[in-house]
């Protein structure tokens, strides 16, 4: 039991990189939400590989086919199932990794877990390709959230030494997020975006890769959503985010930087704003206190590790011959998976937030 | 539904800071584990307030009383319930916060969530005091893990500008962890420990507080535990850790630092060690790949925010009179809650790991 | 993970028959519900042993002690924990059953499950005594349901050849249920009640026992609660009911009798009643169609097996000496556990219904 | 969240009667199980409509298409997704029921639940057609159970006044179950089978329908599986069975009949059999005591209501015009859905049992 998350909205992900199809089932999704194909395409297109050498050259159309849960383009309340057919697979690229696990991939741990039965081709069920149905689920959740006045968007906050524009987390607006969620390359500052692309292309030429940080915001959240302790906003969101391949860190608000500061710096004073709403003057808490929303924007960052697939020679073991060996990972890879992780993080956060908001009022 | 976590071992936490008692129920705990009172006391004593001015002066004995699940000092497989009676409460300290929420506390969000019915005294169910039963549950899980060859220990890796000794995550040993888990003040380097204490005492005198970072390790894990995606090692652990009050960030292995690096730096080469075991030469992955253990030590860090309760004057709102106002938070507080969070993080990680290891073999 | 149920309201039961205390934690219970001690006592007193020779002579006061979740007699939204201290235990009665499992008790299966570590005294965690905290949780849920206009009550529909009064399930009223829930001996017809008592007392004298059927109703349910398939009204209620010791059958509406009938007999015509409400002319469906409430009264029956503990000589095995042997089960037992099961079934149904009603509107 | 069940093996069902496709995702299924197409076809063919006038005339090929989770015909441990394309739909048959809910169908309750957005065509997600993917999931679970020595089979124990052959639940054998699971018409006694068919055909001619009782057995279960209370064998199985459309009652062992008996009759003496195994002389308990298996055969019966769709004129309401009206339900229907429910009950029991057996040993 692993590829399922959610309590009120339950998302089940299935498929392998080189199988027939991948897809998802979204159970408990609200009835009466109109499918917005433009928003859906917006999320999916950001996850797709590009032909600008910042991503893998394995380009898939990734057109979802809906099997259930919709009637006349409107959700019925029944489970929504959708699939993406796999088209552009080159299993031959993966021949031979069966016994020589790729460093920092799941090949070795999965072999131990499934006693050799797991599908190693293209990472199988562990492939980043499985994030396509997660994005579809996320796009649906974004539609339901928009109906509730909530906007979620993410950007590529950092690649190697380069940082995107800083947003004041106490002041970020819905309008800024609506621009952010539509960026083809997901950095807000156009100059930084170009520098990031150059950095990534250079790494690709050097047969290497970069990690990055994705930052996600949500505006329009009511105060009082979420629950204390293990059903709080942070554990629910983190529980989904850490399920996304390559995520190795998650922080909310001032996060790790805040933990190096003093209370007098990190505490957020409560204030009434002009409209008579309770707000905080700063937003180091990132939108939730005691696991419960304050009504301030949600702020969460995810650390994405460098793409493990690099074409440089690497050391590994030969499990069959039980000796050390070298490996060169061929195939087509993303030199910086963080770029395409942006809509995935956005989707994971959207799904977690909808799950929290659908919690019965108590 | 909030104060419950776990799939195979289910821990339910209850109580309020100023109620009759706090406690926990641990359901699904293995039968046949002998209660080790020494280990239990070791965990609980590290969470207790000290009289050395590095913690609050509200000292509680925190002696757990077992209600069920044990027979002749051995677990029976039935749910284990235990309580801690509340003794040293000064509700008068909290009079008046009902309408003036303390900055960066849950007072405001909880009031919105529970329409004014929540118990605001001492933070009620949101109090850090609720971590005592979590530590008890963690101590029990540590016993069951030890029976399986797994050792879990945490230390205070950072307070403000001060860092504790660095451990090579590929080389850390069970023996080092057995020393670590017994430190009264939870920094390994004795000189750094003294500097940290001084820093904390100074903050207390200045009526301020510090945040910190807790780092936790586990050795002896088998390869092949955990599942892909949302039942992976990272999401399961993070889902518990973010349920601990004051945790605002979690990272595994090289975490956020790794996300600023290149694949050639961050990838961990597989090697056979002298005993014929597959290991990784470095441990930037932190013990799990694809959500599944590799057999390398688990490495996780949690960012603890500065104690929100500081005695300096702060800005807040008066919810009754609907205007801005000032507040001075009296009472007895920890100038650096990260100190006492160390056994809590250790406990949360232990509970999550046992939950993963008890997953049925498939 | 076993002694926990519920999705939105999570009830965790703990304790053993001969331990320090038994109790429950109710997590996710709505804030703002006033504790009605009269209603609570009403439920608990029906479960208590009587001195009229229809029950065991092990009488316990069963006074719950609340540990958390209440402030000034009103629920706070935090987990409600309560315990019952065990007072009247005679472990000596159970000496010797360790190796000679009592027929139709859990002694043998529990020994196999927990490798001999389970507490066999008085049935340990499997004891019917554990239904006391379930009744407490049920009483709380009945309070929250009453605030929502829902009334739940059960009666002893059958003991051996004797049947209580028949209620037309399409016409049963809230007023009838309010009478039903307060009956000391839980049969509605006073003459039948006396006959049932005589039957039970006779069985006791004969060192034997009777089974029985408990029937439970709920009025005031809205139409449209519950979900299709596995979160339907029937599976959710049955999942709790079958967790009650001694329940071996559950049926809704016309149940097994309906399955021997024809569609033209069993179908329930829809009609508008005088107040313009959609109702069904008959109520063979028992309140739910497709797992979702219709607004008609809920009707559910539970088959309670005869008390397994009888004082007649019985055949069993000696697990130590690995041979067949005989056994006489001493101690104090209920000659018809169905009598005291009535408030337990009522409580289980109430808890399941509240769980369903608190499902977030979608 | 409704169409998902299971803790260790999680089955998610999706689709509508008149949509593109229906299907399931089975998450947590063991790796290394060889797909047995013969066994799969055996289960699916029993659920298919026949051309012998005992079932609907809507015949579908119901060929599953696997999308994931298999490699070279062996399970990989990754989620198994499979779909059935819908082929033979006549939505026109259902035109007009939108406002005139069919008696004893989910039309009315679903409309209230989903505010008019649910797909009413052919029952939508509530259709009995959704049991096809449940049978597929069940067939997979039967394969995994067979690898563990467990055999599960069901038969049509009763239709109207006719009863199939009686099996002694203490003596039923694996061999008998292997015959039972392959019967085209699912009654074991050939003469009774013919009588049942005649009865059903007559009802069809009379535009009416019959209910029935399905009885399911499992042999080869180890002693000691399952957990007390709400994760016991009975609640887990019943929670799945009551999720099957048309199931209105479930009983284990002697069930309701046992509740009308005395302890001296209903108790099952323990005995050593010739092979030195602990057994019970009778099997009124039905395979589980205290929620935990005894090693005796599992015995469970499900009451199936008469098919709600009958072609006789019936009374209903017009929700649009808000008045009483009449309805004739056209379309193609099963005159006794219990016939085709047999492999569905078998599948539900198999899935629940595998879920229980995969529980981590504690």
Image: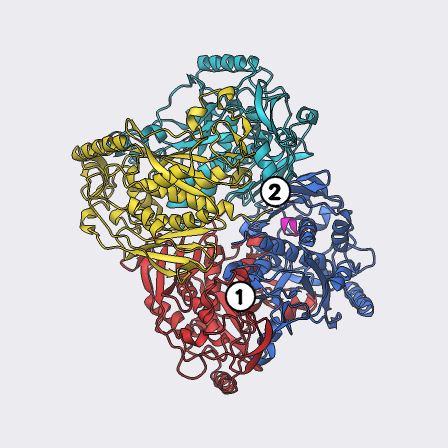
Chain colours: A cyan, B yellow, C red, D blue
Looking at this view, is B188 or B124 the one in front?
B188
Instruction: Decide which of D148, C156 is in the foreground and name it.
Output: D148
- Rendered location of residue D74, percent (x, y): 70, 42
Position of residue A189 measured from the top left corner of the image (x, y, whole percent): 43, 16
In the image, the segment drawn in magenta is: D122-127
The residue tagged 2 is A69
In the picture of the structure, the residue carrying the numbered disc 1 is D290
Q: In which chain is the residue bearing label 1?
A: D
Instruction: Give the class, few, some or many, for how many residues have Cα within 10 Å of label 1's Cα (few <14, many ≥20).
Output: many
Tell me what residue is drawn at x 57 percent, y 29 percent: A128
Badge 1 marks a residue whose secondary structure is loop
Q: CA distance from mark 2 to mark 1?
A: 40 Å
Answer left or right for D312 relative to B304: right
Q: Point out residue A46 in the picture as x, y percentages from the top left corner.
A: 55, 24
Give residue D69's position: percent from left, percent from top.
66, 40
Q: Dot 2, how many residues are within 10 Å of its Cα: few (below 14), some (14-19), or many (20+)?
A: many
Which residue of the protein is positioned furthest toward the front in this rendering? B274
| Observer-nearest of B347 and C355 | B347
Examine the rendering and report whether any part of residue B80 can be seen: yes
Q: Is residue D164 magenta?
A: no
| Displayed quadrant of residue D220 | bottom right
Q: Main secondary structure of the magenta part?
A: helix
C59 over A142 or under it: above or below:
below
Nearer to us: label 2 or label 1: 1
Exactly how many numbered labels are in the figure? 2
Residue B246, above or below B191: below
């Amino acid at each position: 039991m692993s590829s399922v998350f959610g309590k009120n909205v339950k998302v089940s992900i299935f498929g392998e990189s080189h199988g027939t199809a991948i897809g998802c089932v979204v159970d408990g999704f609200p009835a009466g939400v109109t499918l917005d194909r433009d928003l859906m395409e917006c999320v999916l297109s950001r996850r797709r590989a590009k032909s600008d050498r910042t991503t893998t050259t394995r380009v898939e159309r990734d057109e979802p086919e809906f099997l259930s849960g919709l009637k006349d383009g409107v959700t019925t309340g029944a489970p929504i199932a959708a699939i993406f057919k796999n088209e552009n697979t080159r299993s031959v690229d993966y021949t031979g990794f069966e016994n020589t696990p790729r460093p920092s991939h799941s090949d070795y741990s999965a072999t131990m877990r499934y006693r050799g039965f797991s599908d190693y081709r293209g990472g199988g069920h562990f492939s980043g390709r499985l994030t396509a149905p997660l994005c579809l689920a996320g796009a649906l959740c974004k539609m339901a959230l928009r109906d509730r006045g909530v906007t979620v968007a993410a950007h590529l906050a950092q690649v190697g030494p380069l940082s995107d524009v800083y947003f004041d987390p106490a002041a970020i607006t819905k309008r800024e997020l609506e621009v952010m969620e539509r960026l083809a390359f997901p950095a807000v500052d156009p100059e930084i975006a170009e520098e990031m692309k150059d950095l990534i292309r250079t790494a690709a030429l050097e047969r290497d890769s970069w990690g990055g940080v994705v930052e996600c915001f949500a505006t329009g959240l009511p105060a009082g959503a979420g629950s204390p302790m293990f059903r709080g906003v942070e554990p629910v969101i983190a529980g989904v985010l850490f399920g996304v391949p390559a995520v190795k860190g998650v922080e909310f608000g001032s996060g790790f930087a805040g933990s190096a500061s003093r209370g007098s710096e990190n505490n957020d004073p409560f204030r009434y704003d002009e409209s008579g709403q309770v707000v905080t003057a700063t937003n180091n808490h990132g939108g939730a206190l005691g696991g419960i929303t304050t009504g301030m924007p949600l702020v969460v960052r995810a650390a994405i590790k460098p793409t493990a697939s690099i074409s440089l020679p690497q050391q590994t073991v030969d499990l069959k011959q039980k000796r050390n060996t070298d490996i060169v990972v061929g195939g087509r890879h993303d030199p910086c998976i963080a770029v395409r992780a942006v809509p995935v993080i956005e989707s994971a956060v959207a799904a977690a937030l909808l799950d929290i908001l659908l919690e019965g009022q108590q």
